[in-house]
Image (tube, rainbow, N blue to C red):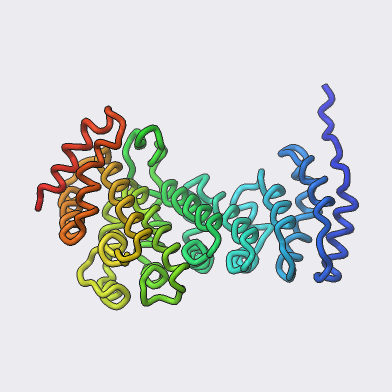
C-alpha cells in the first residue's frame, strides 16, 4: 500500500506571503492563499508544516494590526494534533497572553483553544494552574470580552479544565436530561481549583469584574454576570463546597458588600444581580432552576442541603417570581425527572 503523504499544494506561495507580511506587517493578508492550504490539512500532513509555518504565523500575530482571523484559523488547524506541552514549546507564555489580551476575538479564541488542550489530562491542567498570568488573563477575557463567542468558548474551556482537574468526583458521572454534567473519569489533582478559588487575587478579580462597582461598563458587566451564573451550576456539581465557601470574607465585604464566608455561589445568587434588569433577573431565575435540577442528582450531604435551603430562602424572601418559578419547575421537566425533582424542591423550599 502506498503510504506516501500527498503534498499540500500552495504551501510555497503561502510561505512567501507570510515572509512578505513579516517584512511589512501593514500588508493585508490574502485569504485565498490561507484557505487553499488549510482545506488540505490533515493530521497526517500537518506535522512537517508546523516548524515551517507556525513560527512565522506566531511572529506575525505579535505585531499584526489588521484582522488576524485567517492567521488564527491557520494556527488553530496547525495546532490540532499537538498536545498542550508541545504547544508550550512552540508558543511562549507571552505570546498566549498577548493573544488573550487582543481586541480581535479570533486571537482570543485561538489562545483559549490552546488552553483547552490542557483539559485533556490532569497533568496538563496542573501545569496550566502554575501559569498564574495566563490563568488571570484568561479569566479576565472570558468575563469581559464583548463578543458572545469568546464568552462561550471561555465557559467551555474553564468548565472542562475544572472537570479534568477535580480531585473528587461521582463514580459514574452525572447527566440531566441526557446532557452530561460531570464526565466519568479518574480524579485530578485539584490545582486549578486551588488557583481559582483559593488565590486571593483571582477571587478578587472575579468579584470585581462581576460587581456593579467594577471596571466594566453596564453591558459588559451584564455579560460577565451571565457567564458566571451559567457556569456555576456545572462547577457546583463537581465541587459544591469550593463554590459555596471562601476564606476571603473581607473581599466579599469590599467588592459586594456582604459579610460571611459564602463563596462565588452566594455572591452570584444573592448579591450580584440587579433584579430591576429584567433580562438579568430571568438569567438569575434560570440559574436557580438549573442549579436545583443538577443538585437533585448529586451525592447527598447535609452541608449541601443546608446550604441550598439557606440560599433559596434568602433569594425568595423578596423575589416571588423566583419562588413561583421554582415551585412550577417540575411541571416543565420530563416525567421521569419531574417525579423526583418536585419533592426535592419542596424539601428545599419548606425550610421557610
Residue 284, given in percent of the width and then of the height, sits at 32, 56
Give the total number of marks visible in the rendering: 0
Question: Residue at left 19%, top 37%?
Answer: 342
In this rendering, position of residue 283 left or right of residue 77: left
Of residues 272 and 198, the one nearer the viewer is 272
Nearer to us in this view, 279 or 306: 279
Q: Report the residue that reaches farthest toward the top.
A: 1
Image position of 76 (left or right of 246): right
Query: Percent from the top left, x then y, of residue 341?
Result: 22, 37
Looking at the figure, which quarter contains the N terminus? top right
Residue 16 visible? yes
| Res 316 → quadrant | bottom left
What residue is rendered at 25% in x and 36% in y? 331
**For the point 39% across and 62% down, which residue is it?**
225
Q: Quadrant of residue 295?
A: top left
* Residue 307 position within the rendered picture, expressed as x and y whole percent measured from the top left: 19, 54
Taking depth in this image into account, of 220 and 94 the one nearest to the observer is 220
Classify residue 177 by image quadrant: top left
Vertical order, 129 against 101 (above or below): above
Instruction: Point out residue 98 in the picture as x, y percentages from the top left corner.
Output: 62, 68
In this picture, residue 130 sits left or right of residue 21: left
Identity of the residue drawn at 37% across and 77% down:
213
Does residue 130 appear in this view?
no
Amino acid at each position: 500500500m502506498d503510504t506516501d503523504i500527498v503534498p499540500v499544494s500552495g504551501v510555497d506561495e503561502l510561505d512567501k506571503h507570510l515572509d512578505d507580511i513579516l517584512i511589512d506587517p501593514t500588508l493585508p493578508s490574502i485569504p485565498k492563499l490561507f484557505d487553499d492550504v488549510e482545506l488540505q490539512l490533515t493530521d497526517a500532513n500537518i506535522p512537517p508544516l508546523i516548524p515551517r509555518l507556525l513560527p512565522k504565523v506566531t511572529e506575525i500575530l505579535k505585531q499584526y494590526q489588521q484582522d488576524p482571523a485567517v492567521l488564527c484559523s491557520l494556527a488553530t488547524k496547525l495546532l490540532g494534533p499537538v498536545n498542550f506541552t508541545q504547544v508550550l514549546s512552540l508558543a511562549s507564555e507571552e505570546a498566549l497572553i498577548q493573544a488573550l489580551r487582543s481586541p480581535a476575538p479570533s486571537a482570543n479564541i485561538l489562545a483559549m483553544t490552546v488552553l483547552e488542550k490542557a483539559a485533556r489530562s490532569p497533568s496538563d491542567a496542573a501545569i496550566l494552574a502554575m501559569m498564574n498570568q495566563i490563568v488571570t488573563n484568561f479569566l479576565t477575557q472570558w468575563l469581559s470580552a464583548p463578543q458572545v463567542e469568546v464568552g462561550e468558548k471561555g465557559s467551555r474551556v474553564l468548565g472542562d479544565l475544572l472537570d479534568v482537574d477535580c480531585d473528587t468526583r461521582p463514580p459514574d458521572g452525572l447527566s440531566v436530561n441526557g446532557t452530561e454534567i460531570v464526565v466519568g473519569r479518574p480524579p485530578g489533582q485539584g490545582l486549578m481549583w486551588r488557583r481559582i478559588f483559593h488565590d486571593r487575587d483571582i477571587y478578587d478579580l472575579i468579584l470585581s469584574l462581576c460587581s456593579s462597582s467594577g471596571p466594566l461598563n453596564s453591558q459588559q458587566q451584564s455579560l460577565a454576570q451571565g457567564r458566571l451564573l451559567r457556569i456555576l451550576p456545572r462547577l457546583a456539581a463537581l465541587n459544591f463546597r469550593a463554590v459555596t465557601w471562601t476564606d476571603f470574607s473581607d473581599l466579599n465585604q469590599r467588592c459586594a458588600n456582604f459579610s460571611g464566608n459564602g463563596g462565588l455561589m452566594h455572591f452570584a445568587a444573592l448579591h450580584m444581580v440587579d433584579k430591576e434588569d429584567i433580562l438579568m433577573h430571568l438569567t438569575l431565575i434560570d440559574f436557580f432552576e438549573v442549579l436545583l435540577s443538577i443538585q437533585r442528582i448529586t451525592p447527598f450531604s447535609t452541608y449541601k442541603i443546608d446550604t441550598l435551603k439557606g440560599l433559596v430562602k434568602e433569594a425568595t424572601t423578596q423575589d416571588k417570581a423566583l419562588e413561583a418559578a421554582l415551585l412550577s419547575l417540575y411541571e416543565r421537566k420530563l416525567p421521569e425527572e419531574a417525579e423526583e425533582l418536585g419533592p426535592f424542591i419542596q424539601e428545599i423550599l419548606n425550610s421557610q
